[in-house]
Amino acid sequence: GIQVEQSPPDLILQEGANSTLRCNFSDSVNNLQWFHQNPWGQLINLFYIPSGTKQNGRLSATTVATERYSLLYISSSQTTDSGVYFCAVRNNAGNMLTFGGGTRLMVKP
Amino acid sequence: DARVTQTPRHKVTEMGQEVTMRCQPILGHNTVFWYRQTMMQGLELLAYFRNRAPLDDSGMPKDRFSAEMPDATLATLKIQPSEPRDSAVYFCASGTPVTDTQYFGPGTRLTVL
């Protein structure tokens, strides 16, 4: 099946800093989503972005499908950004989303 | 504020018992997903329904797990008999093919002793 790797696995930031999270995948995809799981366990969909660039407030995402990676940018980080960020993809042959291992982010005040 | 709801939020049971988890998708969403999250395996997709019909349940152990959608407002995931290795947080998510985004419920934390 498709492989999804996220980096870095862990990230500690000072409040106000910017960061870039990366998701690499091993096959062509027709679906790519970024999720945030907050410290209380709630999963929130951030972006549906199989290709191109999207922005939502301080967050933006870019997927370069031809090179099989996606980036999530967090600008001016806040303590509420802490949690785990997951990338999930689906290839053209499947119905199921495959999740990466996540990037655990801690933003310190 | 439309949300996916899941019940129960927490369940502790003994090995061998039947466990039923319920999910109410967002009204109007016709795709429903069941996920399991553990420390060891991370997030795994167990099953996927569209218009109440199972499209793919290849992620689910068939001998003990079953997933159904009796109607458009209710999805169920059953484990019979339960085993300690089934201990996990089970998430339900719903969505529509148009946007292809998924909205998650709060999860059911299952502990099998």
Image (tube, rainbow, N blue to C red):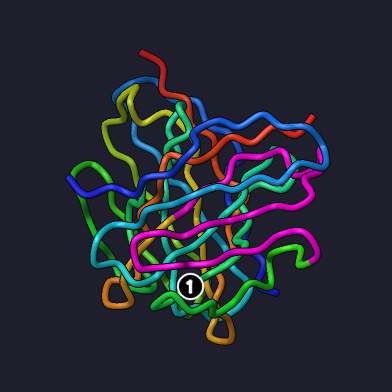
Whether residue B91 appears in magenta in the rendering, the answer is yes
**Residue placed at 28% from the left, 46% from the top?**
A59
> Above or below — where is B10 with respect to A94?
above
Q: Check disc 1: other Cα within 10 Å, few if <14, some if 14-19, many if 20+.
A: many
**Residue placed at 63% from the left, 56% from the top?**
B44
Instruction: State the residue in front, A65 or A49.
Output: A49
Is residue B12 found left or right of A104 in the rendered image? right
Whether residue B30 appears in magenta in the rendering, the answer is no
The chain identifier of the residue carrying mark 1 reads: B
Residue B59 image position (x, y, % from top left): 68, 66
Main SS type for the magenta part? strand
> Above or below — where is B109 with respect to B101?
above
> Above or below — where is B12 with respect to B99?
above
Residue A64 image position (x, y, % from top left): 42, 72
> Above or below — where is B76 with respect to A95?
above
Q: Which residue is mark 1?
A: B49
Is residue B99 found left or right of B93 in the rendered image? left
**Residue placed at 24% from the left, 61% from the top?**
B27
Is residue A18 found left or right of A25 in the rendered image? left
Q: Quadrant of residue B63?
A: bottom right
Q: Which residues are magenta?
A: B63-92
Is residue B80 found left or right of B77 in the rendered image? right
Instruction: State the residue in front, A29 or B78.
Output: B78
Q: Quadrant of residue B15?
A: top right
Q: Secondary structure at mark 1?
A: strand
In which quadrant is the C terminus of chain B drawn? top right
